[in-house]
Amino acid sequence: MDIDKKKLRADRRVLADRIRAIKMVLRQRWTQPMAETQRMLHACKREATELSILWAHARGRRHLPDAERCREVALRRMGEYVREEAA
């Protein structure tokens, strides 16, 4: 299986921009409850980690020390980024 690295790279970039935007909001004076914003940041960071695991897996490496977890996450997420084969 061949991974569409261009799409993966673009998704990682979009996610990084989203994380930066959320952090800017959280760094300002809190005038309202921020629990939902913090949960959104956590979810984005988890997503970024999973995409980084997939990126490392595509290069034959591990992103985290736990090899089994890396493999499980990479195989689960790979379906979104498999390049279509030409007919």
Image: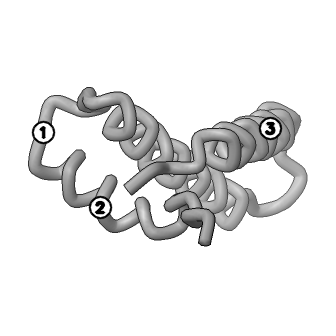
Dot in front, 1 or 2:
2
Q: Which quadrant is home to the C terminus?
A: bottom right
Look at the numbered discs 1 and 2 and tell me whether their residues touch, using CB distance below 8 Å.
no
Looking at the picture, how far across and down is residue 49, in whole percent? 45, 43
Identify which residue is drawn at 45% across, 37% down.
55
For the residue marked with disc 3, what is the amino acid? Asp
Identify which residue is drawn at 85% across, 60% down.
32
Q: CA distance from mark 2 to mark 3?
A: 25 Å
For the residue marked with disc 2, what is the amino acid? Leu
Looking at the picture, how far across and down is residue 40, in whole percent? 65, 60
> In which quarter of the view is residue 78 placed?
bottom left
Which of pointers 2 and 3 lies earlier in the amino acid sequence?
3
Relative side of 55 to 87, left or right? left
- Disc 3 packing (10 Å; few <14; some 14–19; many ≥20): few
Camera sees residue 23:
no
Q: Which disc is residue 75 wearing?
A: 2
Q: CA distance from mark 1 to mark 3?
A: 27 Å
- Disc 2 packing (10 Å; few <14; some 14–19; many ≥20): few
- Disc 1 packing (10 Å; few <14; some 14–19; many ≥20): few
Q: Which disc is residue 57 wearing?
A: none
Camera sees residue 3:
yes
For label 2, the SS is helix
72 and 86: which is toward the camera: 86
Which of pointers 1 and 3 lies earlier in the amino acid sequence?
3
Residue under label 3, please give it: 17
For the residue marked with disc 1, what is the amino acid? Asp
Identify which residue is drawn at 80% across, 37% down.
17
Relative side of 55 to 4, left or right? left
Residue under label 1, please give it: 66
Q: CA distance from mark 1 to mark 2?
A: 14 Å
Dot in front, 2 or 3:
2
